[in-house]
Image: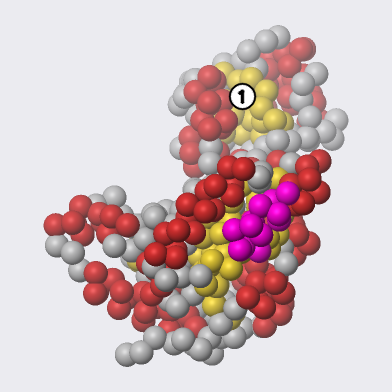
């Protein structure tokens, strides 16, 4: 079976993990859908997956499907999920031809009756080399040109783009341009001017400069609950509250109350009734909190149970102590999730306003 080579496509790569590849893919997919109508999406090789109907599906494929309703089978949007044992099994008995056929078949299904397909890679150009399916190799298999997403700056990003481009070129894949992501807003014009000059010297186009918005790297209560394996103590409708600041209730309740505000996550031991009463008094005045985490795993007293039931924000119970709870929240790698409606809307506006879609399409 011959691979579909007529449907326009682009492969979104990055210089490293967490540079904003999925964020840019989501924004570009929204712009492409507005432009073409029928658009497909595929992440040929995924490393973070969930199980749906006994199939392992990459989390980004689930996100795109839920947000855009692409009318593509999920198993084809995520043909290869790299399980913990995947690499060892491949090295024992390589089956590259089988994997290639799976990717080709999935792409053809995703591209069926579509006017454009966005392909998303995994990490930098060399990720997947150990099982012969690096991002560069996959882009070649799909006859796709590449856009590289990298972090904002001038020297380091261009150095890393050059390194990644070399691997794509070795596979015979053309890199059409670069998107600089997470640029400090006050440096936007400066970075744009000099990064464009630096990339032009390498024969590359600057396709967009996306400002950094702290909100996009702020976790939601639901993400924190999953990370901590915490239990929800009250019924509420705000699991997707965004945490902008953390307050650890290790001081007096009166002082802590002055630190509360919208977007604040209060972390306090479960036996601190005084802290819960202060939070209750604060919320009773119509004020807002992102949520409360009761730490140390102690069984809440009847008074604490009564207080938490009154709270409009989520109240979670964690087995960890306050320090470990705060550390885990701080170290969370925040990924977009289907329920993050506020963030998804913001991403779509951000990419539409700062990435030059026409430049990408002209290069194809």
Q: Quadrant of the C terminus?
A: bottom right
Q: Quadrant of the N terminus?
A: bottom left
Instruction: Spot the residue most to the left.
Output: 92
Residue 108 x/y as whole percent: 43, 84
The image shows residue 160, relative to residue 44, as above or below, that is above
Residue linked to disc 1? 267
Residue at x 49% of width, y 48% of height = 17
Residue at x 80% of width, y 26% of height = 282
Residue 158 x/y as whole percent: 59, 49
Instruction: Spot the residue most to the top.
Output: 252
The answer to whether residue 231 is seen in the rendering is: no
Which region of the structure is painted magenta?
194-205
Residue closest to the eye, 21 or 301: 21
Left or right of residue 200, residue 285 in this image: right
Residue closest to the eye, 225 or 166: 166
Left or right of residue 41, residue 252 in this image: right
The answer to whether residue 352 is seen in the rendering is: yes
Residue 169 x/y as whole percent: 44, 65
Q: Is residue 158 magenta?
A: no
* Main secondary structure type of the part rendered in magenta: helix
Residue at x 73% of width, y 24% of height = 279
Residue closest to the eye, 206 or 84: 206
Q: Quadrant of residue 344?
A: bottom right
């Amino acid at each position: 079976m011959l691979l579909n080579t007529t449907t326009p496509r682009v492969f979104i790569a990055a210089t490293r993990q967490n540079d904003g590849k999925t964020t840019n893919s989501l924004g570009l997919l929204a712009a492409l859908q507005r432009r073409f109508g029928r658009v497909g999406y595929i992440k040929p090789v995924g490393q973070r997956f969930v199980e749906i109907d006994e199939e392992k599906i990459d989390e980004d494929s689930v996100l795109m499907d839920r947000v855009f309703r692409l009318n593509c089978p999920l198993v084809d949007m995520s043909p290869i999920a790299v399980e913990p044992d995947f690499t060892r099994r491949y090295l024992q008995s390589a089956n590259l031809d089988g994997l290639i056929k799976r990717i080709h078949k999935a792409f053809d299904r995703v591209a069926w009756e579509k006017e454009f397909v966005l392909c998303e890679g995994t990490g930098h150009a060399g990720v997947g080399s150990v099982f012969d399916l690096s991002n560069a190799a996959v882009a070649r298999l799909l006859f796709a040109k590449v856009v590289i997403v990298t972090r904002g700056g001038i020297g380091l990003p261009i150095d890393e783009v050059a390194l990644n481009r070399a691997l794509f070129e070795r596979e015979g894949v053309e890199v059409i341009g670069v998107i600089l992501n997470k640029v400090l807003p006050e440096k936007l014009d400066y970075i744009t001017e000099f990064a464009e000059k630096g990339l032009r010297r390498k024969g590359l186009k600057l396709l967009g400069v996306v400002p950094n918005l702290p909100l996009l790297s702020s976790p939601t209560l639901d993400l924190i609950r999953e990370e901590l394996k915490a239990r929800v103590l009250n019924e509420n409708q705000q699991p997707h509250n965004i945490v902008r600041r953390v307050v650890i209730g290790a001081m007096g309740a009166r002082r802590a109350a002055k630190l509360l505000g919208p977007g604040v996550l209060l972390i306090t031991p479960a036996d601190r009734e005084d802290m819960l009463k202060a939070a209750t008094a604060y919320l009773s005045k119509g004020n807002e909190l992102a949520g409360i985490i009761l730490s140390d795993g102690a069984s809440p007293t009847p008074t604490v149970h009564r207080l938490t039931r009154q709270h409009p924000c989520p109240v979670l119970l964690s087995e960890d102590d306050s320090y470990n709870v705060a550390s885990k929240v701080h170290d969370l790698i925040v990924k977009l999730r289907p329920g993050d409606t506020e963030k998804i809307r913001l991403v779509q506006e951000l990419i539409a306003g700062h990435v030059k879609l026409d430049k990408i399409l002209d290069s194809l």
